[in-house]
């Protein structure tokens, strides 16, 4: 079992819709949870981080964490074509472990 | 502006050669990391350092080494390059507690081993 699992996608949503990206992790000792966005040919950049159970909102982005279910998600409201990218979930215990990423396409 | 740079950006080498990839950050961050990214595997940690003279092995460290002689630099050396090490390599840095803070990534180095 991979430590951090994501659906590889591609996930396709129409412009203006809500995109929902999901991630599960195996280590119950995981402390910090991050969502990175990576455009094709570019380096990852941080979108959100969350440390505690519940929801955390930042503009159009909401991160949700459920430690009991070992589940973290990212919701993107009012999706835009510029949101089309690969989204990487990362989880830290002693070091940071990344999922393989979900490719999101937002169609105009 | 503070930044993190990698060089070279592209490298082609032959099997068996020693290769060193440079990473330099001006954030004055204590923590530095090397990852490789391959299709279907996402980012995998090779080595990391939480300060000068500190180095640690990551998930895929075999065939790689690092040394940290100052805060700004963490060069990654492939002792004897193999075709399986063809990949995109990202360097990253962070501050604060290990594993707790955002990592800032360099632009990446695309390495091809023939």
Image (cartoon, coloured by chain):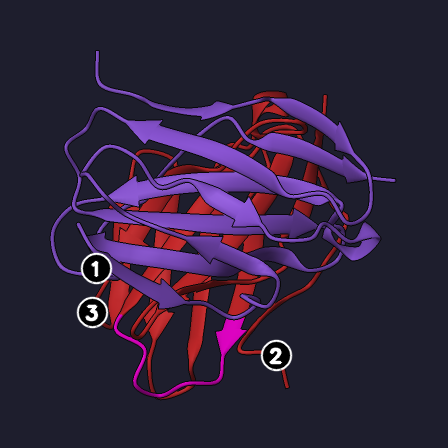
Chain colours: A red, B purple
**Which numbered disc covers residue B100?**
1
Does the magenta portion include A30?
yes
Q: Which residue is mark 3?
A: A52
Give left or right: position of B11 versus A83: right
Provide the chain ID for the residue under circle 3.
A
Q: At numbered mark 3, what does the secondary structure look like: helix, strand or loop?
A: loop
> Sequence order check: which comes first, mark 2 or mark 3?
2
Q: Pinpoint residue B11: horizontal percent, then vertical percent.
A: 70, 27
Please provide the residue range marked out in magenta.
A24-31
Q: Nearer the viewer, mark 2 or mark 3?
A: 2
Total numbered labels: 3
Spatial CA distance of label 2 from label 3 is 23 Å
Q: Pinpoint residue B50: horizontal percent, then vertical percent.
A: 21, 56
- Name the residue: 48% across, 85% down: A26
Disc 2 with disc 1 on a shared chain: no
- Circle 3 Cα neighbour tier, 10 Å, few/some/many (<14 / 14–19 / ≥20): some
Disc 3 with disc 1 on a shared chain: no
Image: A7 above or below B87: below
Q: At numbered mark 2, what does the secondary structure look like: helix, strand or loop?
A: loop
**Predominant SS along the magenta part:** loop
* Residue A23 visible in image: yes
- Circle 1 Cα neighbour tier, 10 Å, few/some/many (<14 / 14–19 / ≥20): many
């Amino acid at each position: 079992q991979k430590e951090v699992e994501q659906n590889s996608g591609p996930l396709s949503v129409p412009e203006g819709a809500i995109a929902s990206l999901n991630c599960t992790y195996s280590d119950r000792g995981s402390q910090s949870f991050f969502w990175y966005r990576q455009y094709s040919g570019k380096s990852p950049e941080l979108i959100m981080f969350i440390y505690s159970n519940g929801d955390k909102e930042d503009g159009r982005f909401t991160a949700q964490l459920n430690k009991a279910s070992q589940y973290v998600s990212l919701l993107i409201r009012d999706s835009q074509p510029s949101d089309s990218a690969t989204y990487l979930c990362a989880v830290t215990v002693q070091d940071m472990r990344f999922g393989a990423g979900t490719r999101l396409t937002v169609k105009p | 502006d503070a930044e993190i740079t990698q060089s070279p950006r592209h490298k082609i080498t032959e099997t068996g050669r020693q290769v060193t990839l440079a990473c330099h950050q001006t954030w004055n961050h204590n923590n530095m990391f090397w990852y490789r990214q391959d299709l279907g595997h996402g980012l995998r940690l090779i080595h990391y350092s939480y300060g000068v003279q500190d180095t640690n092995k990551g998930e895929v460290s075999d065939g790689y080494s690092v040394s940290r002689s100052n805060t700004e630099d963490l060069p990654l050396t492939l002792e004897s390059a193999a075709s399986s090490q063809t990949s995109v390599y990202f360097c990253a840095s962070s501050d604060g507690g290990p594993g707790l803070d955002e990592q800032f990534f360099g632009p990446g180095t695309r390495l091809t081993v023939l």
